[in-house]
Amino acid sequence: MEAVTSVPPDEPSALRLRRIAHLDMDAFFASVELLRYPQLKGLAVVIGGGRRKVDELLHQTPDGTGLREPHFIPVADFPLLKDYVGRGVITTATYAARQFGVGSAMGMMKAARLCPQAIVLPVDFDEVRRFSRLFKSTITDIAPVMQDRGVDEVYIDFTDVPGGQREGGRVLARLIQKSIFDVTGLTCSIGVAPNRLLAKMASEFNKPNGISIVYEDELETKIWPLNVRKINGIGPKAGEKLATLGIQTIGELAAQDLQWLIERFGKSSGAWMHRVAWGRDDSPVVTESEPVSMSRETTFDRDLHAVRDKAELGRIFTDLCERVAGDLQRKGYVGKTIGIKLRYDDFRIATRDQTLDRYIQDAATIRRTAGLCLKRVPLDQKLRLLGVRVGTLERVGDVPDGPPELRAPRAREADPHTRPLF
DNA sequence: AAGCAGAGGTAAGGTCTC
DNA sequence: CCAAGAGACCTTACCTCT
C-alpha cells in the first residue's frame, strides 16, 4: 500500500502513514427531519417523493380541511395517495422503516405497500443544505483537507493534522464526531484507513454513530471476506458479471489473474478491479473541483406523446432550458455542449448533444440547440422523462476566446429544415 | 500515394454514486 | 404495473490533424 508521503531524507523520524478518513452522516435526510419533528422519533418515517404535493399532505386532513400545524398520517390511511406521491421514490428511510424492507430509491407506492404505517415527509432541501454546510464547516475547522462527496459524505486527510496519527486516527475521528454532534445534534460514522478506498469501506463497518479503523495489514481479515459489491464503483452490473464468473468476495477477486480480468472487463476496468481488490489506491483527497456539466430533468406525472402532447411537452422543455440557464448564470458558468436526454415509457434512454462554436449561458440558445437535438431522436413512442444538459463548462471570465457569453444571441430566422420541433 | 500512429474532439450509450 | 434527479466517468466509434 502506498502509505508513505514524501519525506525529507534528513528526517527519517518524520515518516508518516497516510491516514484518510471517510465520514458518512447517518440517515441524513431523515435525521434532519426528526430534529424538527422529535415526536416521530422511533417511528417508521420515509422521506422523499420529491413531488411538491407531499408538502400539502402534511398540512391537510383526508376530508380536505386544511391544517396549519403539520400532522402525520400513515401512508395507507391517505386517500388518493398516488396523487400525492406520484412516481416519486424514497430518499431516506428511518431505521424503523428499514425493518420493513423500505430503502433508498424504492418507489413510494411500493414502500406504502411494504410499510403501510410509514409517515411520509417531503424533502426539505434548504434545511438539508443548511445542515450539510454546518457539519462540513465543523470538520474543516478541525481538519482542513476535506473533499466533498455529496450532501452527506466527505473524505478527510488526517495525515498532517496534529494528532491525526494517534490510535490510527481514532482520536481525531472521535473529536470530529463529537464536534458534529454538539453543533448539529446529528450522528455520523467514520472510517479511517491508509487510503480513500479502504476508508470508505471502513465507515460502513460500525453504523450508525461508529468509528472503525482499518490498518494496512488487515486487508485479508477485514476486506477480503466482503462481497465485491462493497467496493465503491462495483455496482449491480459488474457485481452480476463477477458473480457469473464465480467471484463473490473481494478476496476471490484479488486471487484472479490481472490479465484474466483485463480480458473480461477491459484494460482500464480490469486493472482497476485488480488494484482495488488488493486495497491499493493512491488517489488524493481533492479539496476543490470544477463542475463538468449542469442539467435539469423531470419525470412527468403521466407519459406524454411528442405529437399528441406537443404543447405540454413544449412548456416543460422550455422550462427545463430556463432552469439550466438560471443555474449557469447563478453559479457563473458558460458551456458549449448542449444535450438532451429522454426516457421512453419502457425506460429506454436516448441522448443527443451538439457542440457549439462558442460558449453560451442563455436560455434561448440552449432552447434552440436542444430543440435541434430533439429532432434527431425517434419520437414515435411515449416519453416519461425529459432532460436538458449543458456541458464543456468554463467559468465566466475564464473563456478561451474572450467573453462571448455577454454578446446578445444572434437573431436569425430558422430555416424550415432546422426549425425545432418544439 | 499509401499506410500507420497518436492526440484530441465529438457523439451515443452505459454504469455508478448519493 | 412500478422504478427521481444530478452529476461524474467509462467505453466505443468515428473523425480530423499532424
Image: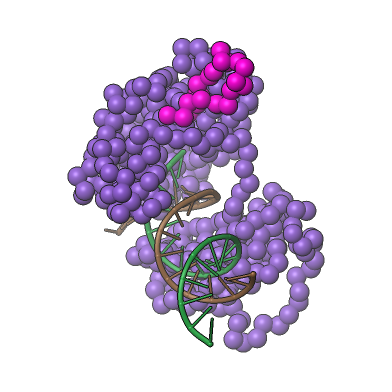
Chain colours: A purple, B green, C brown
Q: Residue at x 59, y 52 (%)?
A: A292
Where residue A67 sits: x, y (%)? 51, 37
Q: Residue at x 50, y 58 (%)?
A: A298
Where residue A309 sits: x, y (%)? 48, 73
Q: Residue at x 29, y 26 (%)?
A: A220
Instruction: Look at the picture and state if A210 lies above or below C6.
Output: above
Q: In the image, A413: left or right of C6?
A: right
Question: Residue A24: within the magenta?
Answer: yes
Where residue A331 sits: x, y (%)? 69, 48
Q: Nearer the viewer, residue A201 or A90?
A: A201
Main SS, magenta region, reads loop
Question: Residue A177: within the magenta?
Answer: no
Tag count = 0
Question: Which quadrant of the figure has residue A5?
Answer: top right
Q: Nearer the viewer, residue A412 or A161?
A: A161
Instruction: Look at the picture and state if A203 lies above or below A360.
Output: above
Q: In the image, C8: left or right of A77?
A: right
Q: Nearer the viewer, residue A353 or A344?
A: A353
Rendered-image quadrant of the N terminus of chain A: top left
Rendered-image quadrant of the C terminus of chain A: bottom right
Q: In the image, A109: left or right of A5?
A: left
Where residue B3 sits: x, y (%)? 46, 77
Q: Nearer the viewer, residue A49 or A255?
A: A255
Q: Residue at x 61, y 31 (%)?
A: A133
The answer, for residue A69, to whether it is visible in the render is no
* Magenta-tinted stretch: A1-27
Question: Which quadrant of the figure has residue A72?
Answer: top left
The answer, for residue A218, to whether it is visible in the render is yes
